[in-house]
Image (cartoon, rainbow, N blue to C red):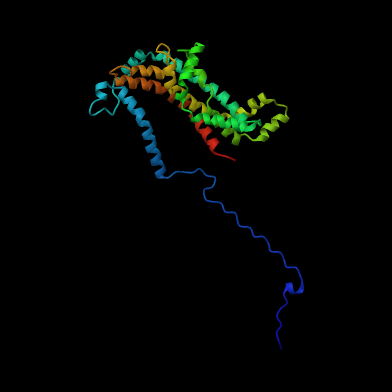
């Protein structure tokens, strides 16, 4: 008796059963969705960076609270002394810092407000509006960042003199009402953060361009505007080169007034440090007030999706 081999399905012309699609089980990584925690090395590195960042400010406080002989001694002091209020009063009276602080607040506030307004509008136009020559204009704006500001000092000074703004705060405010970096920064942010669907929905509802900017663009751009406003305010507050050329000693900004403290042949370093401490305190106050908004703006720009 012979054994016959079983007949396979292809030999009978029958269709073969389809293979079932196999699905891999979804595996969740441990800790997904939880807050990340740094290890000891991360905390140690952050501590070193934080201490290193605070050392210049601490040394300014120490030097401002001692005499010049103690600061310039072979072994300088490392703890604050008892002459802080005396040196602060001397720096305030010698450099007339009261008027200088008011001028710096006016200049920095006007420059910051104008930069946020114009750069946000320009950034929105370059990011979401279609018009001829948009790419070439954006390239020209970015190309201006490569031009050293020292090249424009002479024609800008002559222009301010012809207008009659020599020695006035207008000569410092108006040339810096808008910045190429601000336009580029806002354009890059709005390109990713502002979807076209929001703009189209606003147009369907009958909103004009002014209403779109006020109700759609500004709320979306608020985190980036906070970061840009802080950077612009700090830059305008610390600017020395152009205000030193455009203003005079009777109407200076804070940095120009502090330059007068060290303009003598033998400046008192403790009083100079006291003036530097006065100029730093407003920036610290601004950062304490708007610190959370700045960090939130940076994080919202870093997270996509």
**Can you say which quadrant of the picture contains the C terminus?**
top right
Q: Residue at x 70, y 32 (%)?
A: 201
User: Between 121 and 98, which is closer to the camera in this rendering?
Assistant: 121
Q: Is residue 163 left or right of residue 88?
A: right
User: Between 295 and 14, which is closer to the camera in this rendering?
Assistant: 14
User: Between 162 and 271, which is closer to the camera in this rendering?
Assistant: 162
Q: Is residue 191 left or right of residue 60?
A: right
In the rendered image, residue 22, in percent from the top left (x then y), is placed at 64, 60
In the rendered image, residue 47, in percent from the top left (x then y), is placed at 38, 38
Vertical side of 203 occupied by 20: above or below: below
Q: Residue at x 23, y 29 (%)?
A: 75
Q: Residue at x 73, y 30 (%)?
A: 204
In the rendered image, residue 71, in percent from the top left (x then y), is placed at 27, 24
Q: Residue at x 71, y 82 (%)?
A: 4
Residue found at the very far bottom of the displayed protein: 1
**Can you say which quadrant of the picture contains the N terminus?**
bottom right
């Amino acid at each position: 008796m012979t054994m016959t081999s079983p007949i396979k399905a292809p030999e009978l012309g029958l269709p073969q059963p389809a293979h079932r699609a196999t699905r891999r089980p979804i595996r969740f990584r441990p800790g997904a969705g939880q807050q990340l925690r740094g290890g000891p090395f991360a905390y140690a590195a952050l501590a070193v960076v934080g201490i290193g960042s605070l050392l210049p400010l601490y040394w300014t406080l120490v030097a401002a609270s001692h005499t010049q002989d103690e600061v310039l001694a072979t072994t300088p002091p490392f703890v604050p002394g008892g002459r802080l209020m005396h040196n602060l009063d001397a720096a305030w009276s010698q450099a007339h810092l009261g008027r200088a602080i008011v001028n710096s607040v006016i200049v920095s506030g006007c420059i910051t407000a104008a930069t946020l307004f114009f750069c946000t509008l320009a950034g929105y136009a370059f990011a979401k509006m279609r018009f001829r020559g948009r790419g070439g204009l954006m390239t020209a704006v970015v190309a201006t960042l490569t031009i050293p500001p020292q090249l424009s000092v002479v024609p800008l000074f002559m222009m301010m003199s012809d207008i009659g703004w020599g020695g006035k705060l207008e000569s410092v405010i108006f040339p810096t009402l808008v910045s190429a970096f601000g336009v580029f920064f806002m354009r890059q942010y709005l390109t990713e953060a502002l979807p076209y669907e929001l703009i189209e929905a606003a147009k369907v509802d009958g909103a004009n361009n002014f209403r779109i900017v006020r109700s759609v663009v500004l709320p979306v751009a608020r985190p980036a505007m906070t970061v840009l406003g802080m950077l612009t305010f700090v830059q305008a507050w610390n600017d020395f080169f152009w205000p030193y050329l455009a203003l005079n000693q009777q109407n200076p900004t804070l940095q120009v007034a502090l330059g007068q403290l060290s303009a003598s042949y033998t400046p008192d370093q403790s009083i100079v440090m006291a003036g530097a401490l006065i100029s730093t305190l407003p920036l610290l106050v601004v950062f304490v007030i708007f610190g959370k908004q700045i960090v939130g703006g940076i994080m919202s720009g870093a997270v996509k999706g």
